[in-house]
Amino acid sequence: MTKERCPWASGLDIAIKYHDEEWGVPCYDDFRQFEFLVLESAQAGLSWNLILKKRQGYREAFADFDPVKVASFTQADVERLIVDPAIIRNRLKIESTISNARIFLELKAKHGSFAHWLWGFVDGKPIVNNWDDISKLPANTPLSDAISKEMKRLGFKFMGSTVVYSHLQATGLINDHLKSCFRYQEILEMYKDAPEFGEVTSSQKSRKRR
């Protein structure tokens, strides 16, 4: 029996796999959070499927999405990456990924984890929407506006409200699967196992290798 999915997850196997296994899963791991920040900022103005195709290239180019290593990148690294066909060769996006990593680490140091800081905008409680038509999904909301404004104030680049909203969807702060999608209920079940807000999870204490 064919599973019913959100309409955007069709055609490419890579998009289906991403939808079925990752999109909307509540994320409390800083390395995973950073990975999505890198990919979503790279996606600005482009298609998400293109970014998924280049995901492995980004993993190799940006030190397995380790923010500490990325934050230490130099101008020589920028010049190396600008000619790397495995990623989006946009100088501003490459440079912003490095500067964003440094701000990411500052937030982590101040709040214990970036994830804790981000989840604080929803008091640790994910927003569960009840969409029955994909056309009703917003591109941004007052919540993403507020987070984007704060991230820009802190110095983050390529973190407009639409990019931030995509990040909230991807990392499970918002469940935007359609009610008819098989993942909608599965994500709701995952919320039951969420740590108490403020609790440092094991994935924050030590990195999970994929």
Image (cartoon, rainbow, N blue to C red):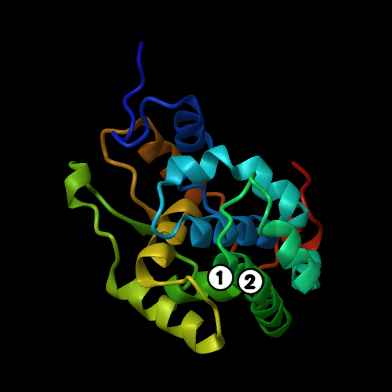
**Tag shown at residue 145:** none
Query: Which picture quadrant has residue 82?
Result: bottom right
Q: Looking at the image, can residue 162 be seen?
A: yes
Task: Judge from the rendering whether residue 80 lies leftward or rightward of residue 197; answer left or right.
Answer: right
Q: Residue furthest bottom?
A: 153
Q: CA distance from mark 1 to mark 2?
A: 5 Å
Contact (Cβ within 8 Å) of mark 1 with mark 2: yes
Quarter of the figure with the N terminus: top left
Query: On the image, numbered disc 2 is attached to which residue?
Result: 95
Q: Position of residue 30 (x, y in %)?
A: 67, 62
In the image, what residue occupies the spot 81% across and 72% down?
Answer: 72
Q: Looking at numbered disc 1 in the image, what kind of residue is underneath it?
A: Leu
From this view, report whether residue 38 is shown above or below residue 68: above
Characterize the local packing of mark 1: few (<14), some (14-19) or many (20 or more) Cα atoms within 10 angstroms: few
Q: Looking at the image, can residue 173 be seen?
A: no
Q: Position of residue 62 (x, y in %)?
A: 72, 56
In the image, what residue occupies the spot 52% across and 69% down?
Answer: 119
- The residue nearer to you, when weighing 135 against 85, is 85
- The residue nearer to you, when weighing 177 against 197, is 177
Q: Position of residue 110 (x, y in %)?
A: 69, 85
In the image, what residue occupies the spot 81% across and 65% down?
Answer: 69
Query: Which picture quadrant has residue 100?
Result: bottom right
Characterize the local packing of mark 2: few (<14), some (14-19) or many (20 or more) Cα atoms within 10 angstroms: some
Say how many tags the image has.
Answer: 2
Q: Position of residue 189 (x, y in %)?
A: 46, 42
Query: Which picture quadrant has residue 162?
Result: bottom left
Which element type, helix, strand or loop, lies under badge 1? helix
In the image, what residue occupies the spot 74% across and 47% down?
Answer: 60
Query: On the image, numbered disc 1 is attached to which residue?
Result: 92
Q: Looking at numbered disc 2 in the image, what kind of residue is underneath it?
A: Glu
- The residue nearer to you, when weighing 188 against 60, is 60
Task: Judge from the rendering whether residue 135 lies leftward or rightward of residue 144; answer left or right.
Answer: left
